[in-house]
Image (cartoon, rainbow, N blue to C red):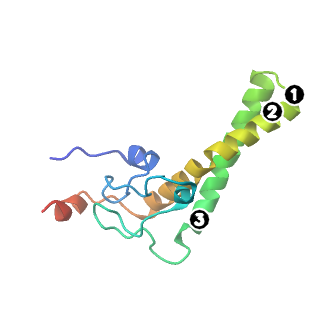
Amino acid sequence: MSKKRSRLNSTLNLKCPRCREGNMFIPVKSVSDLFEMPDNCPVCKTEYFIEVGFYWGAMFVAYALSSATTLGCFVLAFWGFEWSITASCVFFTVVVILISPYVFRLSRSIWASIFIKYDEHALQGSSD
């Protein structure tokens, strides 16, 4: 019996929602690779682009993640470190810019894991 990766673990690590093994994104070798995704899972061959505009909903997930991060950074800087409003705004702006590529990828991973269900037999066909 194979070791099953949890849904949360596979989503946070940007793994295929069906087999929870293949990478949803290509490795980053240049800035242009930050937002590139293969059409199919390299392990179980699951199609990532189910229909045209499938990932539009991921924009709402990214908005929620970015808003929560922004609020958290502002609260930490303004009340936690007692910085000025200007310094707090600069802090959360820098943080959001730095994490935006991961938020983009994570929001797509979350969105895909909502609609593409785990299949414990997805790997059996690829290992034979």
In this rendering, does residue 68 appear at all? Answer: no
Q: Is residue 43 left or right of residue 10?
A: left
Report if the CB atoms under discs 3 and 2 are less than 8 Å apart. no
Please state which amino acid type lies under the numbered disc 1: Ser
Report if the CB atoms under discs 1 and 2 are less than 8 Å apart. yes
Q: Total label count?
A: 3
* Front-lying residue, 79 or 30: 30
Residue at 34%, 67% (x, y): give it: 46
Residue at 67%, 54% (x, y): give it: 63
Q: Is residue 121 left or right of residue 40?
A: left
For residue 84, the mark is 1
Q: Secondary structure at mark 2?
A: helix
Q: Label 1 crowding class (10 Å Cα cut-off): few <14, some 14-19, many 20+?
A: few
Q: Label 3 crowding class (10 Å Cα cut-off): few <14, some 14-19, many 20+?
A: few
Q: Which residue is mark 2?
A: 88
Residue 85 placed where, x, y %? 87, 32
Q: Residue furthest left?
A: 128
Vertical order, 37 against 10 (above or below): below
Label 3 or label 2, whichever comes before in sequence order:
3
Q: Nearer the viewer, mark 1 or mark 3?
A: 1
Vertical order, 79 against 97 (above or below): above
Q: Which residue is mark 3?
A: 57
